[in-house]
Amino acid sequence: MSMFTQKMRMLTSVVMDSDREKVVKALLEKGVMEFVHIGTLPAEKMQKLSQHASTVPRAALTDMRIRIETLLREGSVSLPDIEKTDIDNLPSLDMEASRRALDRLSGSLDTIRAQQREINQKMNFYREIIRYSSEKNDEYLDLRVGSINHGDSKDLAARLDAIGGVFLFSSKPLVSLTLRRDSARVSDVMDKFGWTESTDAEAQKGAMSEAMGEAREKVRNLESELKALSEESSKRIRDKADDLCALWVNVRVNELCEHVESYFSYTKNTTLFSGWVPEEDTDTISKTIYDVTGGRCIIEWTEASQVAPEEVPVSMTSPKILRPFERMVDNYSTPEYGSINPTPFTAIAYLCMFALMFADLGQGFVLLLVGILGTVYYRKNPLKKDGLISRYLCNLLLYLGPASMVGGILFGSCFGLGIFPPLWFDYEAVVAGEPAAGLVQSVYDILGITIKFGICVIYLGLILNWINLVRKKRYFELVFDKNGLVGGVVYTIGIWFAYGFVGSGYREFPSAPWFMPILLICLALVVIKGPLGYILGRRSGKPKESVGRVAIDTIMDFVVEVLELFSGFLSNTLSFMRVAGLGIAHASLMSAFYQMAAMPDNAIASIAIAVIGNVLVIVLEGLSAGIQSLRLNYYEFFTKYFTGHGIAFEPVGLKSRIVVD
């Protein structure tokens, strides 16, 4: 793993048009190149180049791939992995024949789908009746109990089935339960059979109960029929799974090839293409192109330093174990090329914050267990949609659970109980106001710990920012920026000043001969930042401005910078008190639930209250701790050093699931 984003180089190559297909497949197999359109050549040369003329529209390939994936998903068949042998032995794609084969399979499933739609409609109808009855909304139901004077009850039931409802006509009296909105149609049919309504109140009550039982039985039967139809549909798809998977591989490879070739430009006999490759893969890509073309190629490499940084794609080389935290970084933004890789620092900061806020050995084990079970479940069911606990959350719990357990060991907490001695201090005892050994005696000491932790995080962010600025040679920002050296010095002075004031028992401010000169120097640097920046900007070609405009901008910038330096750093530091706040709330809630559990005389009730309390704390406090840890990373840590102007590196290869146009 590199501490910085991965170094990139741009490949520009010319190959013979006869070797184009082999080059495309070889580059897809490597899957380490992000293709770009040729845009750096002179205009007169670009006019001599032509674009790729597709034999099969890429939209048609995409539509067919999605169609196959839908069928495979319906049959619970996982998508196959594309191997090198699939490319080497790839048959030609006959779009028309493939479309006919898919039409035949879809046609054989249409009858089943029509039956499924019909069954679903019936189930929804019966469920609506059941819902109205259970909610005591009898005004939406039409219950009739009686007899017919002429005709056959079976004939009556057949005609009423077309309307829909529950009909018990095998015994006396006859029972009809329909929706009130259909009462007029039901009356028209019943009048033809001479329906006579019963006046027996007991029969009315019993009829409703029987009708509800019949409705539930019909729903169960329809669910069984629906399940059988789904299994039949899946079986038909699985019988064709090999053909569908082979066709998907063929369509997918052709789609990827079309995507790659859309970036190619052509002369009469040659093909020109370009793209970004990680520096560590440049030799491999060069050798691959030489090998497949037999040396009939020209390869040029352009260093990333010769291109504007905002145009270079960014690849973060984090190990697989840090993948959940890399996703946190991606959700925020993509870092600028050449800057520090935030992933490992995010992982450390996030886990430490979570461990301080949710420190419990037993509850951490529950989180770990949920993460393990969820991960195993999703691996066994790769086509299953994410539920309330998503795949990503399950992966994250594999880290948060152990972090919470470590915190529990440090503070001697297991399901909110001090059943073993803490390695650091007894968190619950301190929150409860009980005498505790060591330096931590009160909640104020806990607040102090989290503030010190926040100071360390902020200093780390400043140092990472200084490293980024030195690498980018932005020395002006390094010195004058609020997150630069001036900001670091002011923050250090502020920390010294605050600790001196607190150390005196809030009675007097600290004093030192160096304090005022250094502070005045920092303020002077903030003042000259505007004029000096204007002078440097003029040298680089920025437009000229009046002296008055420069003076006003300097004053305004000075006021804003001073406010941000003092109030901004202060709020950033105090924001870490929420770490202590959630930790104290966690201990207080567990104490409250155990006090409630001790109230009932019944042991089972006490255990139930304790269990419910733990579940609520795990869900609510765990969620709060996770969100607050993310917030502190994004708004207090990232803002000190993270520059999110990067473009994510998206190489095209056989493992690519999405083609970005």
Image (cartoon, helix red, strand yellow):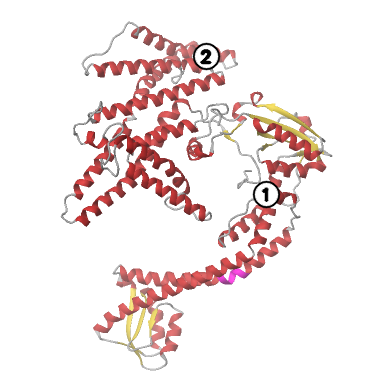
Where are the magenta residues, as a range? 108-112
Residue at (46, 21) in percent of width and height: 463
Q: Is residue 461 above or below residue 148?
A: above
Q: Is residue 660 above or below residue 187?
A: above
Identified by mark 2, the residue type is: Tyr
Left-right relation of 229 to 487: right
Mark sitting on residue 83: 1
Give residue 219's quadrant in the image: bottom left
Camera-side residue of 440 and 314: 440
Q: Residues within 10 Å of mark 2 (few under 14, many from 20)?
A: some
Q: Main secondary structure of the magenta part?
A: helix
**Residue 49 in sight from this viewpoint:** no
Q: Is residue 31 above or below residue 170?
A: above
Q: Amino acid at mark 1?
A: Glu
Residue 261, image x and y in percent?
Answer: 72, 43
SS type, badge 1: loop
Which residue bears the numbered disc 2? 534
- 495 with respect to 84 (left or right): left
Residue 312 screen position, x and y as percent: 62, 30
Quadrant holding the N terminus: top right
| Residue farthest to the bottom, as pictured | 150
